[in-house]
Image: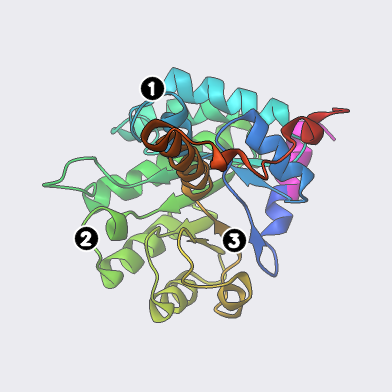
Amino acid sequence: MEAHEQLCETFRRLHDANCFVMPNPWDVGSARTLEQMGFKALATTSAGFAWSRGLPDNQITLDQALEHLRQMVAAVAVPVNADFEGGFAIEPTQVAANVKLAVATGIAGLSIEDSTGDAEHPLHDFELAVARIQAARQAIDETGTDVLLTGRSEGFICGRPDITETIRRLQAYAEAGADCLYAPGIHQREDIAAVVAAVAPKPVNLLINAPYITVAEAADLGVRRISVGGALARTAWAGFLHAAKEIAEGGTFACFEGLPKVDAMFLGR
């Protein structure tokens, strides 16, 4: 079996039962470290990658994103899911073309979200949003791969926290061909349970970027997949900023105590 096909099959099997954590590295080093820690799949983070380039989230170009995906896939032996933002296009035909480019990088899964970046109109109109998922599904099918498609509805993180509308969209994305459904920003347990029930038997991804729930508790609600978005990258930035502030403002270096032996993590690769 071809390596890419095997990765896609492995990734799909992870969604079949139980609940797994798919953390989000932002570069090759963080990806390899998470793989060494035993995580069975990884996901890119558009925010974490953008920050590593000195940019805010959603400011990465398609070419930069594709090169990043190629590097991340080549760095590890586990499946990689792509945070492919909104497909780097609005119209379904261009979303489809870009999805094919993403699939060619060797990823095992990718997500397409429905946010627009416009504060006045933060979500794509319903019909267009559904058409974009349909286009992504068709594009994947035309590649002959089994890349897993995640449909994302962004209302809870872009100023439209309406669980009824979120569920309506996720159900439509499931019918349009999404294999996994994802509504980043939902935190209330009743909302999580409602989303799981609404799209069953298809799996749901839960974003955990704050300590509001545990893996075991999420699994009890029926969640199959957990990601952390940019939270690991933010954790790294927190340590960096704390240390830099101490040096800049206090002229001391207590922050350098107890640091990990980073070289040891990569020796022998």
Spatial CA distance of label 2 from label 3 is 23 Å
The quadrant of the picture occupied by the N terminus is top right
What residue does disc 3 label?
225
Q: Counting residues from the N terminus, which is met first, the one under dot 3 or under dot 1?
A: 1
The quarter of the displayed image where residue 133 is located: top left
Which residue corresponds to the image point at 46% horizontal and 20% vertical from the top-left? Answer: 64
In which quarter of the view is residue 132 placed? top left
Which residues are drawn in magenta?
Answer: 1-10
Q: Residue at x 38, y 76 (%)?
A: 188
Q: How many marks?
A: 3
* Closest to the observer, 234 or 69: 234
Which residue type carries mark 2? Arg
The residue identified by callout 2 is 160
Pick the residue in front: 250 or 78: 250
| Residue shown at the point (38%, 22%) measured from the top left | 61
Q: Which amino acid lies under the numbered mark 3 shown in the image of this protein?
A: Arg
User: Are there few (<14), some (14-19), or many (20+) residues within 10 Å of tag 1?
Assistant: few
